[in-house]
Amino acid sequence: MSAPLLEARDLRVHFRLGRGRVVRAVEGVDLAVRPGETLGLVGESGCGKSTLGRALLRLEAATGGAVHAFGADVTHARGAALDALRRRAAMVFQDPYASLNPRRRVGQSVAEPLDIHGVGDRAARQAKVAALLERVGLSPDVATRRPHSFSGGQLQRIGIARALALDPDVVVADEPVSALDVSVQAGIINLMMDLQAERGLSFLFVAHDLKVVELISHRVAVMYLGRVVELAPADALFADPRHPYTQALLAAAPVPDPRRRAPATPLSGELPSPLSPPPGCAFHPRCPIAEARCRVERPPLESDAAGHATACHLVQVGNIRGPEGHEG
Amino acid sequence: MKGPPPTVLQVAGLGVSFETPEGPLRVVEDVGLHIDAGEAVALVGESGCGKSVTARALLRLLPTPPARVVGDALRIGDADVLTLDTAALRRLRGRAVGFVFQDPMSALNPVYPVGEQIAERLRRHRGMGRAAARARAVELLGQVGIPAPADRARAYPHQLSGGMRQRVVIAIALACDPALLIADEPTTALDVTIQAQLMALLAAQRRARDMALLLITHDLGLVAQWVDRVVVMYAGQVVEQATVDDLFAAPRHPYTRGLLRAVPGATPPGPDGRLWAIPGAVPPPRAFPASCRFADRCPRAQSDCRAAPVPLVDGVRCLHPHLEPLAPPP
């Protein structure tokens, strides 16, 4: 198997809030984005998925563990080594309105990475911007317009064009379609899938919409309170979710089919404060099948032979049927 | 013998415009709606379709000016909403109709404990005494699934999570046993497991109280799971209405069909596993054509679509509606 493009190794990202309070946003995560794949990263707000994505691009500093990029440890990289990371890995943000400078013409925003990294001369950059805009489905003429004159979907296309400016190998996309209407969202997802097919681009696709993740991802990681609780090939994860949290998450997502109305048995309780995560398995206070050991002993993320990894005491590796209440 | 259920909401020819320096902007036009007691109806559409403006217009919550609301009929229970004076309107909002908005903080007063905010509603609209209102507030907090309600009644909004705040808003909305609950994107800001809890709560309360629900949402998953009938809006107009089963099985308007096909998992994907997108964008209100407003994005549009306004006939505003069923999901 080829070496991962971006990799978290026992990565920790903590935020100090003062008065001794610490948010453990990412707490001991091992995760690798492989060449040519889309790795979906899902979980509810506050689970640490966005922080993890940003930390892999060195947009957040690691508190512990390491970030590797393209075979090198970049946890503390500076100068040329950090530039190299930023050339080969790019980011697409959730809010297309907030991620583009409202005072600049969008062509300038798309050209900015080229300017910063000194790529080509002025004419070459202009030609590149025109090609990028065209590739994401916009007319090159729009380069002279400012963000306010675009719709959300068009702005997200511009954000993608900017991310592609330096021909990266991997793009971290943080909720790239969750601010968009469904008919517009479909076009952006199609564009991302096309770009992957064309360029062999890899994506870390951070999202809370499971249906979108199922469609676009090759593998999926589920996070809960700073840790990965399940990691599996996408078809395996959706056909056979094993962690009780993954099962609850899938059951909670409303199915757009009135013939499949789900019985109303939602997961009880709320996400505990990441300031004071529960001991043992962090999910145990909400878990319908938790036992005594779940309250004291944290389950490690263990993989079966097929590469389906789960962090749960009650899902034995090799025991294909999950815990009771599991629906196939 | 039981007669047919009474109509809770009856709307015909509702229009909303806003005064602007460039002249009036008509954002909602010719909206019709009716909801019977105990029924759950969704008003669905994408951003800018006018669904939230419509919901606010129903209770005359839009500031006038700049808004101007017109209609052939707007009745909630026995009240003719368009002719009510301010006092009667306030009584209607407090008693007959409950309202839940997307952002619970906008509905709660940050400087009062949540129990008092419920009690205040009961004292004003039900004439309850201080102690009785307080006790009833705690009871309502319990009914909406807030643990340790007697303690939580003393909490301020900022001390509660987003999901708990929305439960408080629901408790306030239910306080006077409304016949109709209007919920505008009530779970959009919340996580999916919390969303499931709140939708189940709304459904249980609706059953227990025989209350009607108007759910304003963009989420077709919620529509499929939680309502009886659907009204689809596009560019300020109702383009289709049907029972939830009929709408998902055989959407007739090309917009509805496009919307349903664009939802991941709702229908088989297109060639190469691609999603079906709707080309183009919703026109801004300033540019609404007099003829079919979807024609420029519609694969079925013909010259007659661009010739004259298209009326809503038999639940669909389209001259060339689909008659065949939609392929079901795999």
Image (cartoon, helix red, strand yellow):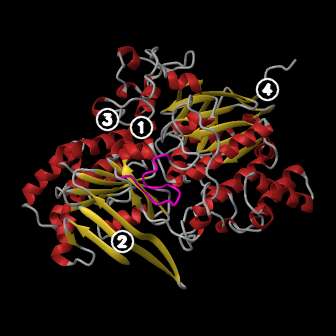
| Location of residue B179 (image quadrant) | top right
Magenta-colored span? A307-321
Residue B63 visible to the viewer: no
Q: Position of residue A97 (x, y in %)?
A: 38, 55
Taking the spot 19% from the left edge, 65% from the top edge, the residue there is: A70
Q: Which residue type does callout 2 highlight?
A: Asp
SS at badge 3: loop
In front: label 2 or label 1: 2
* For discs 4 and 1, the disc positioned in front in the rendered view: 1
Q: Dot 2: few (<14), some (14–19), or many (≥20) neighbours within 10 Å?
A: some
- Label for residue B274? 3
Q: Nearer the viewer, residue A47 or B262?
A: A47
By secondary structure, the bulk of the magenta-drawn segment is best described as loop
Q: CA distance from mark 3 to mark 1?
A: 10 Å
In which chain is the residue bearing label 4? B
Residue appearing at x 57%, y 65% in the figure = A294
Mark 4–mark 2 distance (CA, rounded to whole Å): 62 Å
Q: CA distance from mark 2 to mark 1?
A: 33 Å
Query: Which residue in the protein does label 4 denote?
Result: B6
Q: Which mark is residue B264?
A: 1
